[in-house]
């Protein structure tokens, strides 16, 4: 898969909802309930970070939830790309980018949203054909003001800012012309997930889904 083909798919995914749910799952037994609550709340795009031993199992079971679009986050190596694809992930997200990682994603036909935090990083990815990127870590990299400043010199690049974003500041990013969606973990707090309080997760998802770009 070429970078251009991959970006067409990641752009489509980013346009499904204003928020991509960023999920760190320690118990795959909670995955189906969590996915169902988020999808029912209007957030079908689920990014399961590869930070726990349960992550790949969670991806496998979440892909069976109707309406879900499940990807893998914190994809760092070619091995992560292959494992995510084998588990059923339909996209990947990385906090940064290396040549080996991008080559692996292209070889495995896994659309990936690579991370950038500066104009130089965004330009290097654009040179390779990546027009959809993750702005990370968003808040500590200057926030919405920094992302807005990238729009004029780099109008070809659209971003999914992630990192420090919540219901209070998500709108600042979504109002920018170079933001397609935002990534956020606030829609699935640990206490609600561990307690299986899916109605409350669904309510948070509905609030997030009401945001508009």
Image (cartoon, rainbow, N blue to C red):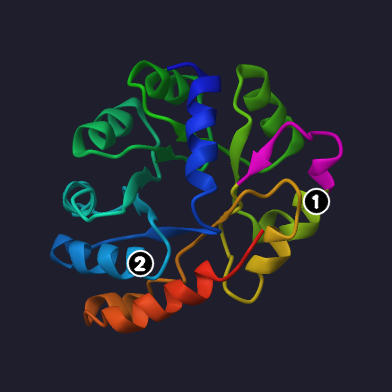
Q: Quadrant of residue 129?
A: top right
Q: Is residue 128 above or below residue 23?
A: above
Q: How many marks?
A: 2
Q: Residues within 10 Å of mark 2 (few under 14, many from 20)?
A: many
Q: Is residue 70 above or below residue 92?
A: below
The Cα–Cα distance between marks 2 and 1, rounded to whole angstroms, is 29 Å
| Tag 2 residue | 38
**Camera-side residue of 161 and 209:** 209
Residue beneath the point at 68% across and 33% down = 122
Residue 27: percent from the left, percent from the top?
18, 64
Horizontally, residue 132 falls left or right of residue 207, namely right
Q: Earlier in the sequence, mark 2 or mark 1?
A: 2
Residue beneath the point at 80% across and 42% down = 151
Q: Is residue 141 above or below residue 200?
A: above
Q: Quadrant of residue 107?
A: top left
Q: Is residue 45 above or below residue 78?
A: below
Q: Secondary structure at mark 2?
A: helix
Residue 129 is inside the magenta segment: no
Q: Quadrant of residue 91?
A: top left
Residue 152 is inside the magenta segment: yes
Quadrant where the N terminus sits is top left
Q: Residues within 10 Å of mark 1 (few under 14, many from 20)?
A: some
Residue 100: percent from the left, percent from the top?
44, 20
> Magenta region: which residues?
149-159
Q: Secondary structure at mark 1?
A: helix
Residue beneath the point at 19% across and 52% down = 53
Quadrant where the C terminus sits is bottom right
Residue beneath the point at 46% across and 74% down = 206
| Tag 1 residue | 148
Residue 65: percent from the left, percent from the top?
22, 56
Mark 2 or 1: the one toward you: 2
């Amino acid at each position: 898969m070429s970078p251009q083909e991959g970006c067409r798919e990641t752009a489509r995914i980013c346009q499904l909802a204003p928020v991509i749910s960023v999920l760190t799952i320690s118990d795959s037994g909670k995955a189906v309930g969590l996915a169902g609550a988020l999808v029912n709340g209007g957030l079908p795009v689920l990014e399961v970070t590869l930070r726990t031993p349960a992550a790949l199992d969670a991806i496998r079971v979440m892909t069976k939830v109707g309406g879900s679009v499940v990807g893998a986050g914190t994809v760092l190596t070619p091995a992560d790309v292959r494992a995510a694809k084998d588990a059923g992930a339909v996209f990947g997200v990385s906090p940064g980018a290396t040549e080996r990682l991008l080559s692996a994603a292209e070889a495995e036909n896994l659309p990936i949203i690579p991370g950038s935090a500066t104009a130089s990083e965004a330009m290097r990815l654009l040179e390779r054909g990546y027009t959809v990127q993750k702005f990370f870590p968003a808040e500590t990299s200057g926030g919405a003001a920094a992302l807005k400043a990238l729009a004029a010199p780099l109008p070809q690049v659209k971003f999914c800012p992630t990192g420090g974003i919540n219901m209070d500041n998500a709108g600042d990013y979504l109002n920018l012309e170079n933001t397609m969606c935002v990534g956020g973990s606030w829609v699935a707090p640990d206490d609600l997930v561990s307690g299986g309080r899916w109605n409350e997760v669904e309510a948070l998802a509905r609030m997030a889904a009401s945001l508009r770009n």
